[in-house]
Image (spheres, rainbow, N blue to C red):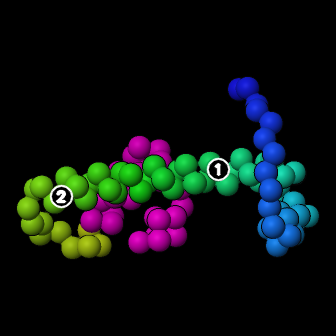
Amino acid sequence: MVMIKKTITVTDQQEEWIKSQIASGHYGNDSELLRDLIRREQSRNSEIEIIREALIKAEGSGFSDRTPDDIRKAVKKRLKDNGKFIGSARQQMKI
């Protein structure tokens, strides 16, 4: 994979947080941290898009007998089956 060098500007508070993440051993350097944050956001956006598509489809199909919990479980299963479910859907998508 080709890597492209980027320059970013962060606040003092953000810089301190980045340094603390590196110091704690979670990441080896700034780039690892930023790449991980980007991957998480991409995954989150993908999960949100799946839910959005399901909601649009549901609006067109009428009423459902399923409970909100049943629907959440079905979404989690679909994400897991598609290899896109990471951790708790409530934590990742804040639903």
Q: Is residue 74 visible?
A: yes
Q: Does the magenta portion include 49?
A: no
Camera-side residue of 5 and 58:
5
> Residue at image x 87%, y 51%?
29
Res 47 quadrant in image? bottom left
Q: Is residue 88 visible?
A: no
Q: Residues within 10 Å of mark 1 (few under 14, many from 20)?
A: few
Position in image of residue 69 (x %, y %): 29, 73
Q: Residues within 10 Å of mark 2 (few under 14, many from 20)?
A: few
Camera-side residue of 92 and 81:
92
- Badge 2 marks a residue whose secondary structure is helix
- Badge 1 marks a residue whose secondary structure is helix
Name the dominant secondary structure of the magenta segment: helix
Quadrant location, the N terminus: top right
Position in image of residue 4 (x %, y %): 76, 32
Residue at the extreme top: 2
Position in image of residue 21 (x %, y %): 83, 64
Alpha carbon distance from label 2 to label 1: 30 Å
Q: Amino acid at mark 2?
A: Ala
Q: Amino acid at mark 1?
A: Ile
The residue segment tinted magenta is: 71-95
Position in image of residue 50 (x %, y %): 36, 51
> Residue at image x 80%, y 61%?
10
Q: Does the magenta portion include 75?
A: yes
